[in-house]
Image: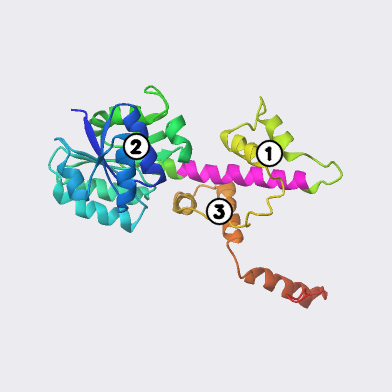
Amino acid sequence: MPPVTIAMIGLGKMGGNMVRRLRRNGIAVVGYDRDAQVVAGLAGEAGMIAATSVADAVGKLPAPKAVWLMLPSGDPTENQLKELAPMLSRGDVVVDGGNSNFKDSQRRGAWLAEQGIGFMDAGTSGGVWGLENGYCLMVGASPEVAQIMAPVLKALAPAPDRGWAHVGPVGAGHYSKMIHNGIEYGMMQALAEGLDLLKGKQEFNYDLAQLTELWRHSSVVRSWLLDLTADGLKNDQNLENIAPFVSDSGEGRWTVIDSIEQGIAAPVLTLALQMRFASQDKKGYSYRLLSLMRNAFGGHAVKSNQS
């Protein structure tokens, strides 16, 4: 039986907007977050049923209960599942919509299955634009659990008939989202390098806002990433107020590790990840060593920090 009400645990940027979209599409939501002000705000704005704790949220659900977690991967999700499981009964369902490692999802799904509790790992893409545009949802679950959660997935997706799919058994949702993010790394790196080259060709004095806007229309490289880049460059092409530091999510690292485990070459995805590491290297020790070596074998000048 499809859930008439679900609980959303974790009401950050993604979780909060998912509550708003569910409510717009007629799904009743009980919400809990450690920040009581966030809970109160969503209750007043979106008509969410406020909960004062996870236990309170679960207690307000009709049976069978469906609980959606939107929490950081690793310990926060692991600990919440351990706290949550004793509150549930056979036939209830837990969905992990965060960016968990697919191996963790497989383990968690098997553990919950032993207790008769269904589990779905939902790879969720769409970011802060998901509220208006809908979310792309790649879900791993048994056919029975996927059928139970279908009305919720249809409400979150761009449309009931697209933007969501049951892609395989437990673990398949987070694995496909992991690879999705690895591809995203490569696409972002390619755009960044190409635009850097264009900016450096000073003899042509390119207007990068004009050029990226041009590419958005009928070019082979048109994409949502290009749309966002073009929009950002309209206001500032020099980007002097943005620090050259790019963080990396766990999924990029997991993608590269999996390519090694499978023995499948993924040089673009790997190098894109390595470039993010390079942007995070505040010490720059390896570059200092390169300068030392060049000086040692070729007598090249070493630039001092003071110069």
Q: What percent of the width, then of the height, locates residue 35?
A: 32, 53
Three-letter code, disc 3: Leu
Q: Is residue 85 left or right of residue 125?
A: left
* Mark pair 3, 2: CA separation: 39 Å
Question: Residue 300 falls in which quadrant of the image?
Answer: bottom right
**Disc 3 or 2, which lies upstream in sequence?**
2
Can you identify the residue that label 1 sits on?
234
Residue at coordinates 47% horizontally, 40% vertically from top-left?
128
**Mark 2 or 1, closer to the camera:** 2
Q: Quadrant of the image for the C terminus?
A: bottom right
Residue at coordinates 29% horizontally, 34% vertically from top-left?
47
* Within-10-Å neighbours for mark 2: few <14, some 14–19, many 20+: few
Give the residues in magenta.
179-199
Q: What percent of the width, then of the height, locates residue 74?
A: 35, 56
Residue at coordinates 21% horizontally, 29% vertically from top-left?
4
Residue 45 is marked as 2
Residue at coordinates 59% horizontally, 47% vertically from top-left?
268
Q: Answer yes or no: do the residues labelled 2 and 1 have beta carbons within 8 Å?
A: no
Residue 178 forms part of the magenta stretch: no
Q: Is residue 145 visible?
A: yes
* Within-10-Å neighbours for mark 3: few <14, some 14–19, many 20+: many
Q: Answer yes or no: do the residues labelled 1 and 3 have beta carbons within 8 Å?
A: no
Question: Residue 49 falls in which quadrant of the image?
Answer: top left
Seen from this angle, which residue lies furthest top? Answer: 161
Q: Is residue 265 left or right of residue 119?
A: right
Q: Answer yes or no: do the residues labelled 3 and 2 have beta carbons within 8 Å?
A: no
**Disc 1 or 3, which lies upstream in sequence?**
1
Can you identify the residue that label 3 sits on?
273
Q: Which of 272 and 8 is in front in this view?
A: 8
**Mark 3 or 2, closer to the camera:** 2
> In the displayed structure, would residue 113 be above or below residue 77?
above
Q: Could you tell me which secondary element the residue under label 1 belongs to?
A: loop
